[in-house]
Image (tube, grey):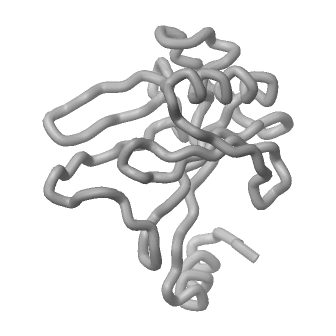
Amino acid sequence: MPSVAIGSAQLNVYDAIGSPGTDLTFFDWLEMGLSHPGLGSVSLPSFRVRGESLDFWKQRLLAAGIPSEWGEDPAGRRRLKFCDPEGQSLALVDDTGLAGESVPWDKMVLAGMAIRGILGVNLERARPDGTRRTHRLIGIHDD
């Protein structure tokens, strides 16, 4: 992944210079147990990659013993989904044609294959109408 800084209880993921839209933090609470996706949770963090790197990632995950599956995201972009060892679903998505650039972290993989940023996450909503109202209030349209 891009630059990874491990603190006492968190994992920060970002590009080589901390560009906006590339930072995602995971907190490691050992007493919480495995991930149980459901209502009220943030799920499926999706990371931007070049389309031509998806085959590289499929092979890298396979070599690490991590199963993955091809699919498309809601916008029809090619996507590779997999789960981390704790059951958190993750996705690598072809960002061809999307605006925005980052400075790939190339210490673990070549820059052309590297994760380029965060595309988004899914919200598992218990009350979607309330969430839609809040989104419209702050200028996000999800319909």
Please state the horizontal and vertical placement of residue 104, each as a whole percent of the image. Answer: 58, 19
* Drawn side of residue 59 relative to residue 50, left or right: left
Of 131 and 20, the residue lying toward us: 131
Residue drawn at the location 65% of the way across and 26% of the way down: 57
Residue 50 occupies quadrant: top right
Please state the horizontal and vertical placement of residue 49, each as a whole percent of the image. Answer: 68, 31
Please state the horizontal and vertical placement of residue 58, each as a whole percent of the image. Answer: 67, 29
Of 40 and 119, the residue lying toward us: 40
* Drawn side of residue 30 relative to residue 92, left or right: left
Furthest-front residue in view?
A: 65
Asked if 74 appears above or below 109 in the picture, the reply is below
Residue drawn at the location 36% of the way across and 59% of the way down: 35
Residue 63 occupies quadrant: top right
Please state the horizontal and vertical placement of residue 51, each as a whole percent of the image. Answer: 79, 30
**Total numbered badges shown on the rendered structure:** 0
Residue drawn at the location 48% of the way across and 24% of the way down: 2
* Drawn side of residue 100 relative to residue 78, left or right: left
Residue drawn at the location 76% of the way across and 37% of the way down: 95
Of 113 and 12, the residue lying toward us: 113
Of 108 and 88, the residue lying toward us: 88
**In which quadrant is the C terminus drawn?**
bottom right
